[in-house]
Every structure is written in C-alpha cells, then in structure tokens.
Image (tube, grey):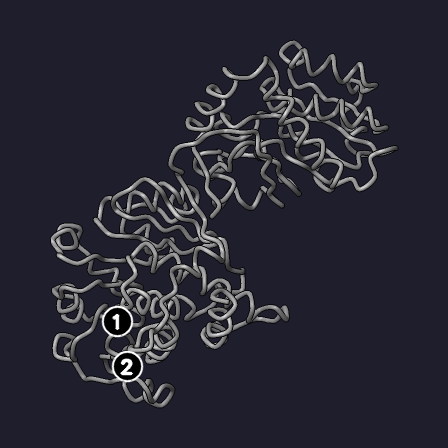
Amino acid sequence: MRTAYSVEKVRAAERDLMARLPAGALMQRAAAGLAVACADLLGRVYGSRVVLLVGSGDNGGDALYAGARLARRGAGVRAVLLAPERAHQGGLAALRAAGGRVSADPRADIARADLVVDGIVGIGGKGGLRPEAAELAEAARGRTVLAVDLPSGVNADTGEVAGTAVRADATVTFGAYKPGLLIDPAREYVGALRLVDIGLELPDPDVEALQHADVADLLPLPSADSDKYRRGVVGVVAGSARYPGAAVLAVSGALRGGAGAVRYVGPGGDAVIAAHPETLVHAGPPSKAGRVQAWVIGPGLGDNEEAMADVLASDVPVLVDADGLRYLDPARLRARTAPTLLTPHAGEAAALLGAAREEVESARLHAVRELASRYGATVLLKGSSTLIAAPEGATVRVNPTGTGWLATAGSGDVLSGLAGSLLATGLAPLDAASAGAYLHGLAARQAASTGTPLTACDVAAALPGTWLSVAA
C-alpha cells in the first residue's frame, strides 16, 4: 500500500529524526537520493548540463547539495538563485567547491540544459508561483524537469493548484508521499514519482492507495460449501424507458463482482434478460423482489422517488449513483441502520454540496471529506483520480488505476454494479468502493491497451481477466 502524510506529520517526523542525527545529516540523505535520481534521468552524468532552480527553503538546499554531487561527477551545474541572500549557504558553498556556478544568464542556461531541477518551493508552499518563479517554470517547458519533493506551486496537503506551477517529468519526494502528489489536479504535474527513504517514523496516513496485493486480499472467493445465496445477492434498481442500457450495464458490472446472484428490478427487464439471462428479474417494488445483501440504485433511473424511498428503507447496504443522488437527504441517510455508499462524479458532488463543479474539481480531497461527513456515508468521488472517504476516520483512499478512455458513457454504471456486488459479498463500503474502483480502472486500461477508444461494455468484458490478474 502506498501511504501519504500531511505536511504537519512529515515535519514533526523530520524534527524527531533530526534531534537524533548530526546536524545536516538529514539533508545529505535527501540530496544523495536526489542526485541518484538526477543521474538516472540523465543517463550519462559526465559532460551533461544541469540547471538548479533554487528557492530559499530546505528543498533549495537539497538541490544545491545534489548539484554538488553531480558536479563532482563531471556535470556542468548552474544554479539560478531566486533569493540569493536567503539561499542555503552550506549547499551553495558545496556547489561552488565542486565546480558548480551561479548562473549569470538563467534563460540561456535553461535553454541548453539536459536537466532542470526544481527546488523553488518546498512542501509548505501555498498558492501559485510568484512572477519571477513562474517565468522560470515557463522557460523550463520542453526541458526535462525533476522536482524536489513536489512540483513548486502545488499544494502538498490537498493537491490544489491555485496558479502557475512547475510541470515535472519526474518528482523525487523524501521520507513519505504527500497527499497532493497522488491527487488531481496536482498529480498531473508530478510525472514519474519516486520516494527516497530518509528514515522517518510516521503515524497513521492521511491518504492511501491500494496496490495489487491489497486488493487481492479483499476479493471474495467461494468456498467448497458456497451456494449462490451464501455468496451474496445484489439487487440492482436501474434503467428506465428512456435509458434501458443503464440497467444492462449496471447488471454487467454486478455479475462480475463476486456476488452469487443479481436481482434486477425495473422497467428494463427485457433488455437485461436478453443480455444476461442469468439475472433474476422482478417488476418491483424492490422490497417485494426477494432477499438481497446489498442494493444498487440510480443508474438511468429517471424520476423514481418511490423506488429510492423503498430501497433506503431497507436494512442492507445501499449504493446510490447517478439519478438516485438527486433524492438524497442527509438526515434520512444518517437515520439508516445499514451503511450507504454514494458514487458521484464532480458535477453530482457539486450539486450535493451546493457548490460549483470547478470548486469540487480543484479541491477534490476537501470535497470528498465534506460529502462523507455531511451525508454520513462512504463516498466514492469519481474522476481522473477517484477518491474514497468514509464518514468516520481521517484516511482517504485514492485509486491508482484508470485511463482517460474511461470518460465514456455508461462506464460509471458498470462501476456501480461492480462495487455493489462487492458490497453484497460482505465487504465494508470503503473496501468495496476501493476494490471496485481499482478493478474497474485496471479493466479499462486492459481494454484500451490497443490505444483505441473503448465502451462501457468493453470495460465490463475485461473485468474477469482483471480479476484473475489481481487475484493470481
């Protein structure tokens, strides 16, 4: 599992470690790791041209000490000092002693550089870059850029990008991942991400990203004495006369999520049976369809408040998506005896919060936490970096899989069915949402591996192979 920690936690851990180490030892550890990453990007250090963009913080010092190491190996290193009087003096002396120089013509040096090292702003930076720094970041476009700890101009804690920021080809972060490195929009500025272990002892994370092994541990597997009911039955209330395809897609996902059976309730029964004859179909209402261990409601539902009320009155977990999100009342959800999982995209999340879509997209971590708290539900906020937050607990999960090709009609319906099926097998909402998003994103990558556009049906069809690759 990849874990990320707030700036406050990282700095506290750094202080604790520095108290036990000789002065400057921690910075030297960071600089050594940074220099190795620079060398890896350069391929050949001797004769290469490296430009350091150096701010007044410790990551400017990291860049200077790393630059000194590269200069000793034969690189031509130039440092652009944004605040010469506040540059790290020890690092600057080391660079000069190794043969590096302070740049007299930053733009010309950047234009000739094989590698630009961004050490402008550290993890405590807020807001976008100041004009002089923004001009340097713009000048570095087209060069290979490596960011020190995080790209300057992004918010380490939230992933927000409030103005101009450095776009890095790679980022070397020290001691621990920071939430902003894993969450959009900042994640798009990070490039290839590398962690240098400097020996920090850290508490519980603020953000975590599951990996293959974590998801494999969550996947339900039948035992020798399993039957379709013991494996869990998921009910799907989806589709309408206008959107019968939503019912088919939600059922497609549900059938591939590990539950033993899928009950479908709604007007799309004929279309569902035609596509998936193994589905148990009922005309409704949901409470009369038979026992289920979880409900999925909302994809393509249209105006059907009665079905929503019926499902929310049940005593089993409920996943609410799409049209179902229009009927939510925080007090009603909090009064439920069973958990609720909401799966909005940014526009739906904005409506639930009474905010603008742009606000949600620019501050996704805040939005998912606020939704979970306000509605007393686990929330899966869909998007380029899907986030999952539980109503209790501070740790948010970010899904590391996916592809831009997932921005296609019906893909969310497949995800709803898949996550709802995992709910029915007995997974907690946070785990069902996390595993569902992971498998869904991985299936999309597999389906889009040819580089051609994919459809929601392609994603559903790729799920068995994805499940096998994770569980193996």
Q: Amino acid at mark 1?
A: Gly
Q: SS of the residue at dot 2?
A: loop
Relative image position of residue 82 (x, y in whole percent) = 66, 19
Relative image position of residue 226 (x, y in whole percent) = 29, 77
Query: Can the viewer see residue 237?
Result: no
Task: Judge the density around disc 2: few (<14), some (14-19), many (≥20) Cα neighbours within 10 Å.
Answer: few
**Residue at 23% from the left image edge and 80% from the top image edge:** 266
Residue 232: quarter of image: bottom left
Q: Alpha carbon of mark 1 to alpha carbon of mark 2: how far? A: 9 Å
Relative image position of residue 311 (x, y in whole percent) = 16, 68
**Residue at 31% from the left image edge and 45% from the top image edge:** 355
The residue that mark 2 highlights is: 241
Q: Residue furthest front?
A: 224
Asked if disc 1 and disc 2 are in contact, CB closer than 8 Å, the reply is yes
The residue that mark 1 highlights is: 302
213 or 235, which is in the foreground? Answer: 213
Is the residue 333 above or below the residue 274 in the image?
Answer: above
Q: Amino acid at mark 2?
A: Ala
**Residue at 81% from the left image edge and 18% from the top image edge:** 98
Question: Exactly how many numbered labels are in the figure?
Answer: 2
Is the residue 201 above or below the residue 242 in the image?
Answer: above
Relative image position of residue 293 (x, y in whole percent) = 21, 69
